[in-house]
């Protein structure tokens, strides 16, 4: 929904594929769109204001979290088993921890560390270059 008094548009991408590109003039009603069925990273951008962007992580399961300001996260009610846990950052990309074992009780600690030297992920490579 466009809540301000200027023209925007919602342009979404899955990789380099454009999913939809819809104008949002001031006062236009909220829109609803379908997301891909498979797990993916969907980038939202505004072609009118190229610094406006966001990401939606589409998953095929309910086990995810958004980290807090301090980087901590908690995923609850994960069934016992071995899993790959992934962390994704808009500037530093994807990190994975393989074979994380969850038991029937207790807590599992999984630490991720971005060093700041990682390559930009393909989802937003170079998109902010030259804007400021």
Image (cartoon, rainbow, N blue to C red):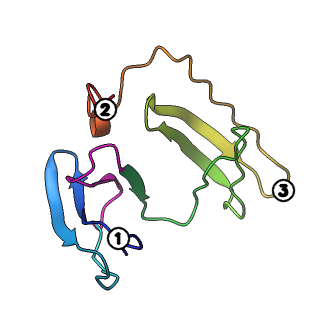
**Residue at the (27%, 76%) spot, across then down:** 33
Q: Which of marks 3 and 1 is nearer the N terminus?
A: 1
**Residue 21 in picture, x, y percent from top left:** 16, 64
Q: Which SS class for mark 2?
A: loop
Circles 2 and 3: CB atoms closer than 8 Å: no
Q: Nearer the viewer, residue 95 or 80?
A: 95
Q: Quadrant where the C terminus lies?
A: top left
**Residue 114 in picture, x, y percent from top left:** 56, 23
Residue designated by label 2: 128
Q: Is label 2 or label 3 in front?
A: 2
Q: Which numbered tag is attached to residue 5?
A: 1
Residue designated by label 3: 105
Q: Nearer the viewer, residue 95 or 72?
A: 72
Q: Which of marks 2 and 1 is nearer the N terminus?
A: 1
Circles 3 and 1: CB atoms closer than 8 Å: no
Q: Is label 2 or label 1 in front?
A: 1
Left or right? Give the position of 17 relative to 35: left
């Amino acid at each position: 929904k466009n809540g301000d008094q200027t023209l925007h548009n919602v342009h979404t991408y899955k990789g380099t594929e454009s999913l939809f590109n819809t104008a949002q003039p001031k006062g236009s009603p909220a829109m609803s769109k379908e997301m891909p069925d498979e797990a993916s990273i969907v980038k939202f951008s505004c072609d009118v204001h190229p610094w406006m962007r966001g990401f939606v992580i589409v998953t095929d399961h309910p086990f995810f979290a958004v980290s807090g300001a301090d980087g901590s996260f908690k995923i609850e009610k994960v069934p016992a088993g071995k899993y790959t846990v992934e962390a994704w950052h808009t500037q530093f990309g994807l990190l994975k921890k393989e074979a994380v074992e969850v038991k029937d009780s207790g807590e599992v600690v999984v630490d991720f560390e971005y060093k700041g030297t990682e390559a930009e992920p393909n989802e937003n490579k170079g998109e902010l270059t030259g804007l400021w």
